[in-house]
Amino acid sequence: MARPRQFDERDAVVRATDLFWRRGYNATSVRDLGAELKLTPSSLYRTFTDKHTLFLRALDHYRATDSAEAERRLDTAGRPVRQVLRDWMLWLVSCPSGGESGRGCFVVNTATELGTADDQVRQRTEAAFEVTRQAVRSLLDQGRRNGELPSDLDLDAAVELLFTTVLGLRVRERAGHDPARLTTAIDAALRTLT
């Protein structure tokens, strides 16, 4: 007769997310996961099949929580579009909720670490990137429709510029670059929306 699980699977995914986010996929061993989650290798394999499956679950968890927070921050709620974009971009490069700076974005870190080598990971990172692009597009379109942004603003070009800026900002934040310099880059990117 199988013994009941003695741990919270959701909590294990949250903790694995944190470990993968800090160390990356390749630098995190099954032993590291076992120590962090306080599980034996057999319990890990029985619950999650393998490290890769747990990593995908961690990436999905991060995407769900990060997307919900980004959606909240991109809600204009009567604020000017440029201010919403600036506040959101500043949040992206500020110290994360855990108080630990230099972590960057788990999705961006994963994309730079694994690139296109893993199709399941690539699909998830591209889906996350597309959510960001669409959120920025929606906000810019709203600004264009309500007269805050020029009516002839090239939405496609503006979305790609801001999206590329965001990715660069996330990498620079992880590299420990000075927040004042990142703020300068944000302000320069937003000035192009004229």
Image (tube, helix red, strand yellow):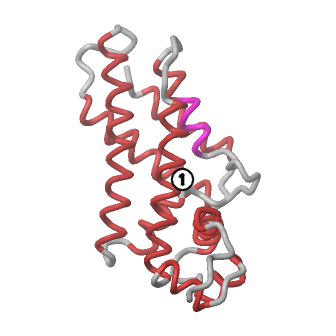
Find the magenta span and give its range. 86-92
Most extreme residue toward the front is: 1
Magenta includes 157? no
Residue carrying label 1: 170
Q: What residue type is labelled 1?
A: Arg
Residue at figure coordinates x 66%, y 44% from the top left: 94
Residue 103 coordinates in the image, percent (x, y):
64, 60
Residue at figure coordinates x 48%, y 50% from the top left: 64
> Which quadrant of the view contains residue 89?
top right
In what element is the residue under mark 1? helix
> Which quadrant of the view contains residue 42?
bottom right
Residue 27 coordinates in the image, percent (x, y):
58, 83
Question: What secondary structure prevails in the magenta region?
Answer: helix
Most extreme residue toward the right is: 99
Residue 35 coordinates in the image, percent (x, y):
72, 83
Please state which of residues 107 and 156 is positioned toward the viewer in this rendering. Answer: 107
* In the image, residue 177 above or below residue 141: below
* In the image, residue 150 above or below residue 4: above
Residue 1 coordinates in the image, percent (x, y):
56, 89
Residue at figure coordinates x 50%, y 82% from the top left: 51
Please state which of residues 147 and 135 is positioned toward the viewer in this rendering. Answer: 135
Q: In this view, does 60 lie to the left or right of 101?
A: left
Total numbered badges shown on the rendered structure? 1
Q: Quadrant of the C terminus?
A: top left
